[in-house]
Image: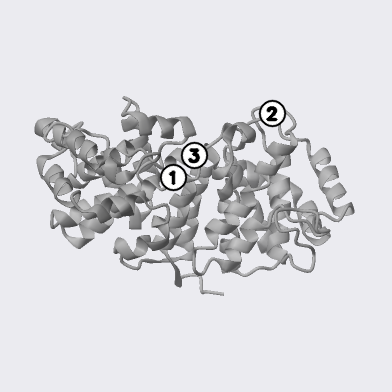
């Protein structure tokens, strides 16, 4: 296990994984953040901006719409720039600003829907707007103009004409000039349109290697858990509850300090794959039919595959992704059994069930303690969950429920 202060995770790997998850919300969003990041970076380099500024701009591109919390809001941004677009930009900036390695990117995101307006957009509400924000705005609008159902090279002239018509109006002249210069290269468009862009993204956008300690990974995972849970109203703050319960259960089970923090990260990210599930299914208050159940069961698979891309996340991925597996082998999606499920995975399964039973949902109050305990006991009896982990929970039920409530306030 890494030491508590050892920097063992490449921030870029983690961010690329998480933005891939955000773009899974809808087919219309496919690779949107990577496209915007790529194009922003290329424009910045064409303008001969410093490498550090181009890198911050590329990071901002990867994260620029994290403040759009619902699918409807994200899809609306693909169609137009509604008056509310500045709200999501401010929200996204606020989410990221407290994480020091992303502070510059957060400042860029804050103003990425401000129009140039013949120079008046150089400031907004009395604050200077970074040139990078306007470059990000331009790249975002280019991405939105692309029709994925048509051949990309056949669209270039139309997109160029639309952007050129907005020179000095929506976008700074020098940014438009740089875009026009690079847009004559077919490879730019073929890269943007390539569904495999994420596979070679690190080769075409040069990021410095920024390694994060487990404490920094916890903070970034906490930010993204808010995005995961905000995607539907039924599970608001669910991941926060699961995370603190899993961390405390791990501590009570004798895990090391760093293992407890790893468990906290796993809890924050355990439902990452739900971003790929239809929101109508996630918010359905009545029983799901067989088709809907099958889609729900895909979410842990997507969590596993997304987190699998992060070097150094192997244990965290296992703990996060196997929370619907059962000791008797009847869980999903891998049908693992007691021979394959580590104590960490068993802890996460119990933490997830406990939190789901005791937290309030829009359609019901959290269950009374005695009823929640009875349901958990039944899952021990039928061989679904670990009796040892359940015994720890039972002996510390009041403490754990208090921690959950505090985390979800």
- Helix, strand, or loop for circle 2? loop
x and y, in percent, of residue 348 in the image: 68, 56
Instruction: Quadrant for residue 170, please give it.
Output: top left
- Which residue is at a point 65% across and 42% down the rendered structure image? 295
x and y, in percent, of residue 370 in the image: 83, 40
Q: Are marks 3 and 1 in contact (CB under 8 Å)?
A: no
Residue identifier under label 2: 285
- Which residue is at a point 45% across and 72% down the rendered structure image? 6
Is 309 displayed left or right of 271 in the figure? left
Is 235 displayed left or right of 150 in the figure? right
Task: Please tell me which of labels 2 and 1 falls first in the chain.
Answer: 1
- Which residue is at a point 30% across and 36% down the rendered structure image? 145
Instruction: Quadrant for residue 341, please give it.
Output: bottom right
Residue identifier under label 3: 26
Distance from Cα at disc 2 to Cα at disc 1: 28 Å
Distance from Cα at disc 3 to Cα at disc 1: 7 Å
Q: Nearer the viewer, residue 84 or 304?
A: 304
Vertical side of 78 occupied by 183: above or below? below
Task: Please tell me which of labels 2 and 3 falls first in the chain.
Answer: 3
- Helix, strand, or loop for circle 1? loop
Q: Is residue 49 visible?
A: yes
Which of the two discs, 2 and 1, sits closer to the camera?
A: 1
Q: Are marks 2 and 1 in contact (CB under 8 Å)?
A: no
Identify the mark at residue 30; answer none if there is no mark: 1
Is 155 displayed left or right of 130 in the figure? right
Identify the mark at residue 249; answer none if there is no mark: none
Instruction: Quadrant for residue 323, please give it.
Output: bottom right
- Which residue is at a point 19% across and 44% down the rendered structure image? 130
Distance from Cα at disc 2 to Cα at disc 3: 22 Å
Q: Nearer the viewer, residue 315 or 103?
A: 315
């Amino acid at each position: 296990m890494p030491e508590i202060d050892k920097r063992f995770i490449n921030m870029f790997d983690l961010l690329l994984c998480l933005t891939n998850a955000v773009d899974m919300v809808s087919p219309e969003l496919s690779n949107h953040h990577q496209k915007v990041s790529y194009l922003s970076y290329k424009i910045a380099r064409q303008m001969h901006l410093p490498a550090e500024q181009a890198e911050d701009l590329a990071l901002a591109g990867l994260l620029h719409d994290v403040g759009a919390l619902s699918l409807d809001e994200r899809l609306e941004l693909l169609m137009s720039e509604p008056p509310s677009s500045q709200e999501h930009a401010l929200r996204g900036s606020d989410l990221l600003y407290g994480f020091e390695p992303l502070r510059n990117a957060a400042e860029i995101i804050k103003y990425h829907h401000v129009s140039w307006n013949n120079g008046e957009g150089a400031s907004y509400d009395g604050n200077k707007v970074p040139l990078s924000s306007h470059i990000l705005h331009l790249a975002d609008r280019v991405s939105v103009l692309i029709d994925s159902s048509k051949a990309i090279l056949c669209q270039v002239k139309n997109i160029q004409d639309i952007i050129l018509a907005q020179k000095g109006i929506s976008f700074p002249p020098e940014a438009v000039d740089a875009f026009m210069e690079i847009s004559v290269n077919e490879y730019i468009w073929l890269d943007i349109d390539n569904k495999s862009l994420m596979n070679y993204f690190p080769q075409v956008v040069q990021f410095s290697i920024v390694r994060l300690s487990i404490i920094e990974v916890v903070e970034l995972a906490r930010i993204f858990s808010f995005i995961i849970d905000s995607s539907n109203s039924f599970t608001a703050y669910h991941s926060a509850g699961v995370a603190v319960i899993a961390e405390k259960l791990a501590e009570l089970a004798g895990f090391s300090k760093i293992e407890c923090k790893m468990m906290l990260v796993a809890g924050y990210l355990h439902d990452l794959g739900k971003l790929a599930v239809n929101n109508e299914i996630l918010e359905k208050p009545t029983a799901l039919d067989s088709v809907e159940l099958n889609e729900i069961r895909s979410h842990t698979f997507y969590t596993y595959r997304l987190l699998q891309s992060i070097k150094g996340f192997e244990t965290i991925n296992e703990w996060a992704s196997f929370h619907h597996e059962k000791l008797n082998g009847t869980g999903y999606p891998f049908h693992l059994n007691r021979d394959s499920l580590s104590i960490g995975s068993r802890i996460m399964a119990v933490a997830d069930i406990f939190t789901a039973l005791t937290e309030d949902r829009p359609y019901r109050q959290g269950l009374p303690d005695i009823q929640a305990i009875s349901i958990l006991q039944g899952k021990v009896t039928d061989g679904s969950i670990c009796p040892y982990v359940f015994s720890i929970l039972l002996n510390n039920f009041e403490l754990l429920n208090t921690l959950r409530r505090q985390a979800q306030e």
